[in-house]
Image (cartoon, rainbow, N blue to C red):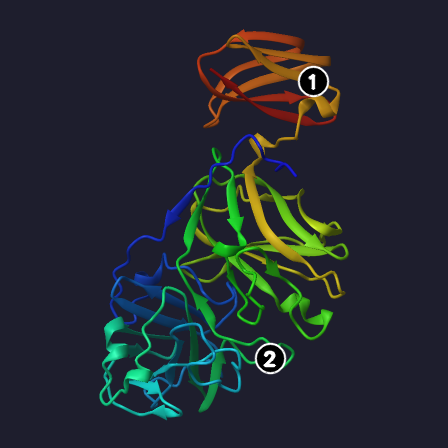
Amino acid sequence: MKRIFTYLLIISALNIGAQEITVDGNQADWADVPIISEPGVFPYGKVYVTSDSVYYMIEVEDEDGKRLDAGVSNYFVGHIDADNDKETGQNHWIYPNAGIDYMLTNTMHFWSGSMVWKWYPLDTFGTKLVAEAGFEKTKLLTIPDQPEAAQIPLESTFGFGFRYKVGGTDLYLPANNWDFAYRKLFTVKPRTVISINNSEVASLTSSNAYYMPFINDQNIDEYLDFQSGGYSTQNPQHWASWAINLETPGKYDIALTHKSEDGGKIQFFLVDIATNETVFETISDIWYATHKDNFEEKALTTLDLSEVPAGKYMLKIKNPTTWGAFLKVKGIALTHELYTNIHSTQDDNNAIVYVDNGKLHVKTNHHTDIAIYSVSGQSIAEHKSINTLNVQLHNGIYIVKITTAEKVISHKVTIR
């Protein structure tokens, strides 16, 4: 099936910029690092990987009964499934589908049938609200008395989880939930930040998403499975998110590529990467249609981000549907409202747009307003109340916007 947004297929993917992380509790170091846990929910966690080191942090809410037991032994612990293989490490009771190869407190320990306590100091820092730590990757393979079988290098995709103390009690991120059988750590892997602007279609794919770690991710490169719990009523606990750079605040049309056994609902959130605060939230009754046999892309809704400041955010989706829709999401396309498109203007029977010998021709059944824009959004020409337009244009890509009383039709043309 053709994509709805066939006129632009450019994906603007920016590599997550190099950061300077110093383990000192300064949150500014983490301002541009994407959130690996569910965005907009506290506590939240981040993991940042460089060519030779790994850094990790959590932040909790500043409320009674939620602050960290800073200064207490083992109040902040990291769990690593270095090879994403549950057969090579400890199957923790919370994470039976992870194999935890290393545990990080203020020292580093390896798994060899049981957790072996060998001292290898780590860089750590903690307050009652924020805890962070870091280590060099090579240190995982050189812990004192570490046997060769326990020397498991950190793969490009690995699992990471957090344990922390509040009020003397060990808590976990991701938190335990017995309703999900496929429980493992957060997946750390190379991902990109997607640019959102008025000149490109932003493609948010399942393989580039951050997602609930209890989702069965065997098919993550093909789709996100939003019904992995024991019951349909657990569907709203699923989430997926993407790190985005909102360059152009405005209204964005969303197309959802999905497959489902029944219709259902989806919800969108925009969360500030630096603060974990939700700055935008849709209502929960945005409906998607039934597509049982194949993945199909359909226009879904429009997000009005006009009042949201430009900057780095996590775009999160959730599935409030509590029945067996068995939603699978392949991806999401966002396009600036200016470029709302249809498969063909001929399908509408209101307008015909074509190019002949470098000249643009537009014919409509009724008098309409016709505007021409460059692909970057610059206005080239505007004509009011006409039904025929013939204009010579320089070589390039243009958007023709036809406005009637009932609708707005846009069409891409290429002049060669």
Q: Is residue 297 visible?
A: yes
Q: Can you name the residue that lies furthest to the front here?
A: 149
What element does badge 1 sit on? strand
Residue beneath the point at 63% across and 47% down: 256
**Distance of label 2 from label 1 (alpha carbons):** 55 Å
**Disc 1: CA contacts within 10 A as few (<14), some (14-19) or many (>=20):** some
**Disc 2: CA contacts within 10 A as few (<14), some (14-19) or many (>=20):** few
Q: Are marks 2 and 1 in contact (CB under 8 Å)?
A: no
Q: Nearer the viewer, residue 348 or 151?
A: 151
Find residue 227 and report its horizontal and vertical position in percent: 67, 66
Q: Is residue 294 above or below residue 152?
A: above
Q: In the image, 265: left or right of 397?
A: right
Q: In the image, 71: left or right of 249?
A: left
Q: Is residue 123 visible?
A: no
Residue beneath the point at 52% across and 68% down: 41
Q: Is residue 340 above or below residue 167?
A: above
Using the image, tell me which numbered label, if any, was put on residue 316: none
Find residue 274 and report its horizontal and vertical position in percent: 40, 59
Q: Which residue is mark 2?
A: 177
Q: Nearer the viewer, residue 159 or 173?
A: 159
Amino acid type, callout 1: Ala
Q: Which residue is mark 1?
A: 351
Residue beneath the point at 62% across and 76% down: 180
What element does badge 2 sit on? loop
Find residue 350 and report its horizontal and vertical position in percent: 73, 19
